[in-house]
């Protein structure tokens, strides 16, 4: 599984530690992080997530889409 991570830069001292912990946990779980996107604050996170979702191609050539049976925040291939 490959994922992208979006990190807000507001209060960088805190968000850097959160990002480090998230990346460590993902790597330990065998998940490959393909890119880290930085945004100024929390309000930009949904915009960036949508921008990533509409630009990503799945392994089967389709577009990434919302997971109809799962949590609304997940993006499924």
Image (tube, rainbow, N blue to C red):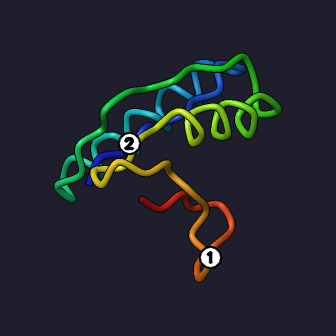
Q: Which mark is residue 68?
A: 1
Question: Which structural element holds mark 2?
Answer: helix
Answer few, some or many: residues within 10 Å of disc 1's Cα (few below 14, many 20 plus, some between 14 and 19): few
Camera-side mark, 2 or 1: 1
Question: Which structural element holds mark 1?
Answer: loop
Q: Position of residue 14 (x, y in %)?
A: 59, 29
Q: Work out whether 48 lies above or below 46.
A: above
Q: Work out whether 29 lies above or below 52.
A: below
Q: Which mark is residue 21?
A: 2
Whether label 2 touches label 1, CB < 8 Å: no
Q: Position of residue 23 (x, y in %)?
A: 33, 40
Q: Position of residue 62 (x, y in %)?
A: 43, 51
- Residue 53 is drawn in which quadrant? top right
| The N terminus: image quadrant | bottom left
In screen coordinates, is 33 left or right of 66? left
Q: Which mark is residue 40?
A: none
In screen coordinates, is 35 left or right of 45? left
| The C terminus: image quadrant | bottom left
Q: Position of residue 19 (x, y in %)?
A: 46, 34
- What residue do we see at 59% from left, 39% from top? 54
State the CA–CA distance, disc 2 to disc 1: 29 Å
Q: Work out whether 3 lies above or below 35.
A: below
């Amino acid at each position: 599984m490959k994922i992208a991570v979006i990190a807000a830069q507001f209060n960088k001292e805190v968000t850097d530690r959160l990002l480090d912990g998230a990346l460590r946990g993902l790597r330990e779980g065998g998940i490959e992080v393909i890119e880290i996107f930085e945004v100024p604050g929390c309000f930009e996170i949904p915009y960036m997530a949508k921008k990533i979702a509409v630009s990503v191609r799945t392994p089967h050539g389709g577009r990434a889409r919302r997971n109809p049976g799962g949590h609304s925040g997940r993006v499924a291939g």
